[in-house]
Image (cartoon, helix red, strand yellow):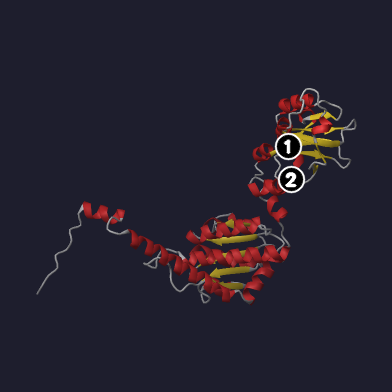
Amino acid sequence: MSTTTPVPNTPERRTATRTGRGVNDQALRTMGQAVIDVEAQAVAALRARIDDAFVLACRHMLACLGRIVVLGMGKSGHIGSKIAATLASTGSPAFFVHPGEASHGDLGMITAQDVVVAISNSGETAEILTILPLIKRLGAPLIALSGNPQSTLGRMASVFLDVSVEKEACPLGLAPTASTTATLAMGDALAIAMLEARGFTEIDFARSHPGGSLGRRLLLLIDDVMLSDAAVPSVLSDALLADALIEMNKKGLGFTTIVDAQRRLAGVFTDGDLRRVLVAQVDIRNARIVDVMTANCRSIRQGVLAAEALQVMQKYKVNALPVVDAELRVVGAFNMQSMLRAGVV
């Protein structure tokens, strides 16, 4: 009878196993692709489950007079925290509560005016089951995201949303992978469905993200970006070209406005205009600014969004613009560097 000699469990072999030195590059690619395939199938299977139960869950959330409270343990807790954050940033006030902490005082954060979303793949998570009777006693609607409709959580829920998966992407079937991805996708579906139902707009989104680039683009006014008062490059329409060049050099925006006695905009003179003057061999010391300026120039009205002003600059390929009021009086000026400093670009 033949026997197989066992491979010695040496430190070298343990190191090779831990570092994956025995696996080639193609095997790593194949493993990664297999995970994506399994998780993509799990998410695709959810489409058929956007049914009456999904609609009822949305109705409960839309009618909520309090907050949407999301519960979950372990990996489900991480997913729950993300779902709560997505809900809150898309017009549905929500927060995450750790079930373990809830049974030690944090349950007071949940009221009868709230809607509770409990996440448990098995539907038998002990920390969630402990507080279910108290949630039911409050009368708060309970929405379950679970893979087991016959579980305790599934039976006690006001609405059951099926996020079960055929298999996990983990080859051992142990690490939550496809199941957490499916749960996150279902949470996103709820959040975006309600965003649409509430008529939530870009401006609403920006109000909850004032520190981000989107918030700056959608909330920042040109008045917040522009230079004003003495910092605005400006000469009167009876000035000489030489005076305009001195003003441009002093203010450093690459242009100057030309205004009448009431500070109404008559035109601008830019670096590009200066190049054309030099090519035409104009007498810089004695030429009048009104003879070489760009009349009927582009300007932007005060009070508009900085992002709108940026669009004008990009459309007409200009690097700077004057800002005017309703009577076309110059009240400010800005250039592309002003936009960059403000984070609009």
Residue closer to the observer: 308 or 277: 277
Q: Say whether residue 1 is left or right of residue 341.
A: left
What residue would you read off at disc 1?
Answer: 334
**Labelled disc at residue 102:** none
Tell me where residue 121 appears, x and y as whole percent: 49, 68
Q: Nearer the viewer, residue 53 or 329?
A: 329
Question: Residue 251 lies in what quarter of the image?
Answer: top right
* Residue 112 in sight: no
Can residue 240 be seen in the rendering of this structure?
yes
Which callout, 1 or 2, points at the residue further toward the start of the chain?
2
Quadrant in which the N terminus appears: bottom left
**Picture quadrant of residue 117:** bottom right
Query: Residue 327: horizontal and vertical position, in percent?
Result: 89, 40
Q: Residues within 10 Å of mark 2 (few under 14, many from 20)?
A: many
Q: CA distance from mark 1 to mark 2?
A: 10 Å
Residue on which disc 2 sits: 309
Which three-letter amino acid code belongs to the residue tagged 2? Ala
In the depicted view, which residue is nearer to us: 165 or 110? 165
At x 58% / y 57%, what residue is drawn?
96
**Extreme-top residue of the structure:** 285
Query: Residue at coordinates 87% horizontally, 36% vertically from top-left?
Result: 264
Q: Check disc 1 and report its element: helix, strand or loop.
A: strand
Residue 201 in percent (x, y) is at 72, 58
